[in-house]
Image: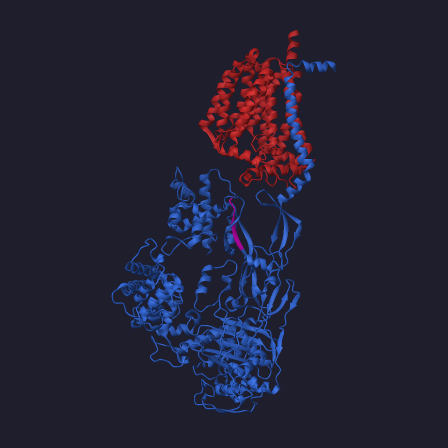
Amino acid sequence: MAKGLKKIAKWKSGRPFILGVVFAVLSFTLIHRLYQIQIVSGDIYRSNFEQMTTRTREIKSTRGNIYDRNGKLLAHNELSYSLTVEDNGNYETKRIRALSLNKEGLTISRILRRNGLSFSNPFHIILDENGRYAYDIEGWSLDRFRADAYGESRIDSLTDEQKEAPAEELMKYLLGTQMFCVTEYPRTNYTSEELASYGLDNLTRQELLDIVRFRYALFTTSYQRYVRTTIAIELNDTAVAELTENKDSLPGIEITEDTKRVYEDPVYFASIIGYTGLASAEDIAEYKKFNASYSGSSIVGKAGIEKVMEVTLQGSSGEETVRVNNVGKVIAIDEDQRRDPIAGNDVYLTIDKDLQIATYKILEQRIAGILLSVLFDGKEMDVDIEDSAYIQLPSYTVYNALINNSIIDTSHFTVDTASDTERRLARAFSEKQEETFRRIRRELTGDNPVIYSGLSREMQEYEHYIVEDLLVDKKEILNMSAVDKTDEVYLAWERDESISMQEYLNYAASQNWIDVTQIASDEPYIDSSQIYDALATVIEETLRTDPAFTKMLYKYMLYDDRIAGDDILRICYDQGIFDTDDGCYEDFIDEKMTAYELLQIKLTNLELTPAMLALDPCSGSAVITDPNTGEVLACVSYPGYDNNRLSNTMDTDYYRMIAADLSQPFYNKATQAKTAPGSTFKLITATAGLSEGVIGEDTEFDCEGVFDLTETPLRCWNVYGHGNLDLRGAIEESCNVYFCSVAYQMGINAEGNWSDSLSLSKLQNYMKLFDLDKPSGIEIPEAEPQISDKSAIQSSIGQGTHAYTTTQLARYATILANGGTSYDLSLINRVVDSKGNLIREYTPEIQSRLTVPQTTWNALHEGMRRVIAAKSQYNDFPINVAGKTGTAQESKSRPPHAVFIGYAPYESPEIAMALRVPNGYSSTNMLVMSRDIMEYYFGTSAPENIITGRAATRDVSMTQQD
Amino acid sequence: MIRKYRLKDYNYRLVIYLAALGMLGVLLVGSAWQPYERRQLLGFVGGMIVMFIVSMIDYSWVLQFHWLMYAGNLALLLLVFAIGKNTNGATRWIEIGSFKFQPVELAKIILILFFARYFMNEENRLSSFRTIVQSVILITAPLVLIFLQPDLKNTLTVLALFAVMYFAAGLSYRAIGLILLVTVPIAAVAIGIILQPDSGILQDYQYERIMTHLQPDNDEYSGKAMQQKNSVIAIGSGGLTGKGLGNKEEITANNGDFVAESETDFIFSVAGEELGFVGSCGIILLLLLVVFECLYMSARAKDLAGRVICSGMACIVSLQSFINIGVSCGLLPNTGTPLPFVSHGLTSMLCLFIGMGFVLNVGLQARIRMEREDKA
């Protein structure tokens, strides 16, 4: 022992020993640290680790289906396949990586294009009609895209050239050495053999664009590997098969399953069912109250039943616990922790699918029939029409409508593939444009401007458009809030039309109504002549591309015979609106068939629908109920739209098109559009008269064609007078004088004087008893009704300030049909869970009961029965129908609205309905429409005889009978 | 150049420790990244063979060429700048075909051999001012080249190695005291300046690494901190006994790729996670035993050169282990240093085994045995 110690001491300087101590201390420092983290804090680190590696992943629930009352499918989910890609390939060199990825992009794009698909990842360069690269967005979104493409996180970081870079320039950059190296490679460029060996030689511009788009998808996620990007959606089976087959040569691709919402017969049901879309922040906040599983990736109902029944349809998403690696890639799924999603419930509507479709088609046929019946060959009506119900439809209006409602795409006239006719029109258009601009400039800056009223109608329209639409609304150059509305010069322009546009604008500039910075911001000191030049230039530049002004010019070209109806219809063939195999094409081209004849044919076979023309009438609505239950059997809004193109990923082009369509397909004609009820209201006046005791069933009034007991005389539609009529007769004849007299009687106060307000308040009581002051109860959004609050006499015959939706009129018809029970109308029949168990049955609530003596009901019913029985349109109809027609005049220059309410069978009603065609001319048209629907519903005629797919002109009339 | 040795004088203990470490290394690397297991095994076996061959060569004979080695070393370090491969802003590798080689690893061994002989030559005036200045100049040349690569941690390692060798050679405590008196304040000021963000002395990535360590929660540096943070979590989650070596059933940080470079610089995170506290301590103790054996042989070396060789190797093994494990468990800033005999990395492994070969040769010629032989 002592010897050992001595030995240690003997170590020459003991220095290895000292080093040993130092090194030992280092080791024990480490052991101490390990003790700290592994033993003392081991549990904390273990739970940290669990947290780091454990994720809960949402499993989406399946959205419930929507069925009609008979279990026919209306909305369901279909599996859809998406193509995703991640950049996980390993390449020997960057050069090989670039070549391989570009080849992969090309291969995928070819497979997609073969199958009618294309890349779907966000990218905003497209190939325009001229084969040039162009952006498909503008403004801030375009700046943002440029910044992304140039790899800058902020728009401000872009250089000035980059900020303005045209699409061609950006493409060059993306294709080049700094980005995706598609066409060239830095330092040593690709050899042509090299490119050829990858199949990357001789690429078309479209192929180059596709490759860039593919690379861009990878580029946008390049900061993180293992992140999957969706590059194509809604793959079809053949695309899936082809991609799967080539999976080995396409590293990183994956086909993922998704569901998409599919609507059956979308056009007929879109107004009821609505559509789905990605949840917005507001949606999430709202629905989270009901179900915690809503998140930013939830698909929710955006309109209609999809929205109303959102929480029911949604179900509840499940959860699974997965273990992930450092980049979040799932490496294991914990089966024990899985919570299965609960599928959404199925919703059964009260709607009868077949009836809904049939009604829609009947509406379309009948509206087309009305159009055809007023159509004539010509430019304008020769005579001024006193009664707007006799307005006729010149064929030139129809030709113009094709351009005006953008059915014909005028921008296609100038592309490379434009037809000869299109080119000719484009040339004529640019001549017309230059000429018009010269005239406008002359009016604006010339020495002898013409006063407004002295201008041609054409120039008036242009000037009106320039001042009111362009300068005020669009450019905000003319600041209306600064304008003194009592100013003499302003009134001279606006009201008297006694000054020229130049004079008006001149004055406006002197009054500082004009925002000079808008027209010439560079030069602060500008004299008035310069202002006019600058203004004329601004106007010209804006009008040159202004779609509304373009349409105006085409209109006058048409009316000035610079282009002909022939040209318009030829272009319909050129642009594929008409099929050249239609059997008419050859005759038309050979001039064996006139444009007018062709137009009639196309309107008749519904290749041109009322919705496409968006003329009067172009829309209609029908609501059919079961009066015994208050269930809605059909709720049609014509025209409809294809909600399949709005659900899932919204087709924004389609959305824009529908939103701009002059026939307003998004506007629900059954639940949103309101008009006065016209003569259909007279049944309420009758009820009021009987209940208030001012008339009895047999009280007679003598109609001499005019009611003149109050200040403004009111004419009966039958100017010769109906003579003596009792109540039933008055309902049958829809005699204005009779019901005005009833209202008048109700307004005689205790002193024996006439009081409009007394009469009106009594009438209003009955409007309320018929629940016309309340929404109909239908589950989808509905406009608030408005009961008339002016003029008792006008109100008593359904004019006044009444405004009701078709659904509200349908409830009114339902109350009449069942004799007093007012249901809250309902579209929803029952909710059933995914296994078929009934969750909830919906029975319409009774809103109120109207109790009047049975004799009153009998009088009303018999009157309504006589209305129908007397009409030739219902000759030989085997089922007894009761009803009432009505028309409501809204504008002197447009045909009146046509309304119908009714029910059948008269003896024991099965259905009640309200129909309305805005600007539908005469209520007779509603009679034939109702008859078609009755025939279909009761099966008294074979469906193919009713729904012919052709405009129905049978029994159409313009004579007013109410 | 080859002397007659007695087989029983061979330090089998050291060989066994190294073999144990090497085998553990093979298993851990295999667990970290399966495809490397074979290469690691080949490297390990090859390294042992090289070590055995080197251990048969008389180190004194080799040391004759110490100036040649010194010059060659400088040439090699210069070559890095000429044909080196730049990765992450630093040029440290020479690529010949598919063979990649990091000269600094060899430089450390050559410097040990060179200074062993140099200090022996200067044995009698080790603490003289002239020798101190001369040796500082001699170490500065390679040090600057290493620093310029830039490679801060190896600069510091070599600096420490130089200090340990000088100390082991027998620099007087008086000289040490004087040197410390001068260098410590200078170093303190220098570090202060270096850590200014815009001093320009540190390369961006070096600065970032240090700041990552000093401020791990600062977002600016968190990218770098993540690897180390995950490593600490991985080691911590290993607990007492770990999750099992090569565990593929359970989710480990290793399986989930949470720690990048887990086969080289962060091999210890695999060890800590899969072998737990027990296994980690085992590795540290094995390394310490290697160090002790080196020091033991240093004490018994026949001459000053032998002593310096053994102490130098002990220093390298100890220091690199400390840095590597210290980084893995969050004691030190994140800097990539392989764990001796364990990490994947052929250059480092081979150079260390060469160094150990020399240590073993020193052991074979131990003073006590030599004396015994002389007597005989």
The residue at 47%/68% (across/down) is: A665
Location of residue B221 (image quadrant): top right
Say which of B347 and A381 sits in front.
A381
The relative height of residue B179 versus residue A901 in the rendered view (above or below) is above
Q: Position of residue B7 (x, y in %)?
A: 65, 16
Say which of B182 and A755 sits in front.
A755
Q: Residue furthest right?
A: A1
Q: Where is residue A704 in the image (x, y as percent from the top left)?
A: 45, 91
The secondary structure making up most of the magenta span is strand
How many callouts does the rendering have?
0
The relative height of residue B314 versus residue A264 in the rendered view (above or below) is above
Q: Does the magenta stretch include residue A85?
A: yes
In the rendered view of the protein, which quadrant contains the N terminus of chain A? top right
Q: Where is residue A201 in the image (x, y as percent from the top left)?
A: 39, 45
Location of residue A821 (image quadrant): bottom right
Can residue A869 be seen by looking at this rendering?
no
Instruction: Give, as a single range, the part of the protein colored magenta.
Output: A81-87
Q: Position of residue A404 (x, y in %)?
A: 38, 67
Q: Is residue A696 magenta?
A: no
Chain A on-screen colour: blue
Location of residue A814 (image quadrant): bottom right
The residue at 66%/49% (across/down) is: A335
Can residue A141 be seen by looking at this rendering?
yes
Chain B on-screen colour: red
